[in-house]
Image: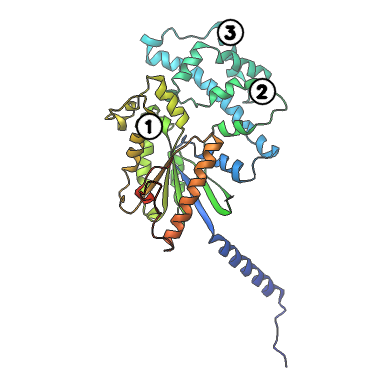
Amino acid sequence: MGQCMSSDPDSKENNDINKTIQKDKSKDKYVKKLLFLGSGGSGKSTLFKQLRTLHGTGYADKDRLQFKDHIFAQIVEQMRLCLECIDILKEDEPDEYKDVELSDSGKQAADILQSAPTLQVNAQISEAIEILWKEDAIRLIYDLRATMKIDDSCAYFWDEVQRIAAPDYVPDDKDILLVRYRTTGVIEQKFEIKKNLFHVFDVGGQKSERKKWIHCFESVTAVIFVASLSCYDEVMFEDEEKNSMVDSIELFKQICNNEWFKDTAMILFLNKKDLFAEKLNSGDKPITLCPYFEQYSGPETGFDETTSYIKEAFTSKNKHQEDKSIFTHLTCATDQNNVEKVFNDVQHIIIENSLMSAGLMGDFGGDDNGNSANSGTALM
């Protein structure tokens, strides 16, 4: 009598599910898990959006329209904040700013903006924004944005407000990259970069969001810690008594030495190098404004010298320098060419680190000067 074969449909379904699970597990072995960490406002989400444009599906019109409300909110809410800051400035520093006032047309525009029932940017609101953006008082607040919590990209959106107010407006790539809204929770997506699969996680950087990070820590191939170079004279969104760069360095120390990441590639992006250079070149914003950089004695406007000093401030927090390297890049998240080049370098680091972890490579090899890349040499 032949062998009895089960014809139970449930059994067949279970077998199919198990095969699918095993297949997915097999695929996952080749997927590199990449975790973006860093303080709020460092540019993590901008880098994530660049990756989606470069190596993901990009943004269809339906996706782009989802950014409209964020853009409208930034235009309206940040201008309203500027108006509030005028009164705060006059109250806190009356000797220097007692004469700061809006013109009559500026006051009328402010009334229109403040009484708007929604955050929608229509023709009336865009005209009010244009008038206010020409006001000396508003320009002064924007110049003081480091301590007033005004986002850098507001100038771009206020300049573009007429285009954005058009009824048929669809955000373009630059709008999507520059809009500033605070990431909450965890955003993830898979990308293929030169036939290598990466599962990338972007998490909120504000202090209130950091307790959620632990859920992403398991089986991470590489951590990309993003720090804003230009935040050295800024205060935190959540704590205006604390310097943003100090918070970033302290957070990096925690992440770099975290037990979860003892065998994980650690990559440091010193981001917003363009805004940093602008601040240096202004001549009145030396990096010594940051409490951690008060001992800096090099050239005040020297880009190479200041960035090297800041890099050392971060990498010196690594407690395991003999066997754990920090690979550093200077980045500009809004520059697509820069991001593409940097991530080409990053994928090599990640793949080589994976081979080392598997015992298939002795070290990272040397660079063109014969130095070991495992020494933590900056990659720029």
Q: Residue 195 in the image: x percent, y percent?
A: 58, 54
Q: Residue 344 in the image: x percent, y percent?
A: 52, 46
| Label 3: which secondary element | helix
Asked whether, in this view, residue 156 is left or right of residue 241, the answer is right
Q: Residue 102 in the image: x percent, y percent?
A: 52, 9
Question: Which of 322 and 28 lies nearest the eye of the viewer?
Answer: 322
Badge 1, how many Cα within 10 Å: few under 14, some, many 20+?
few
Determine the CA span between mark 3 and mark 2.
22 Å
Asked whether, in this view, residue 220 is left or right of residue 134, the answer is left
Determine the CA span between mark 1 and mark 2.
38 Å
Question: Which of 224 and 146 lies nearest the eye of the viewer?
Answer: 224
For this orientation, the residue located farthest to the front is: 369
Give the residue at mark 3.
Answer: 105
| Label 2: which secondary element | helix
As displayed, is residue 187 above or below residue 88?
below
| Label 1: which secondary element | helix
Q: Which mark is residue 163?
A: 2
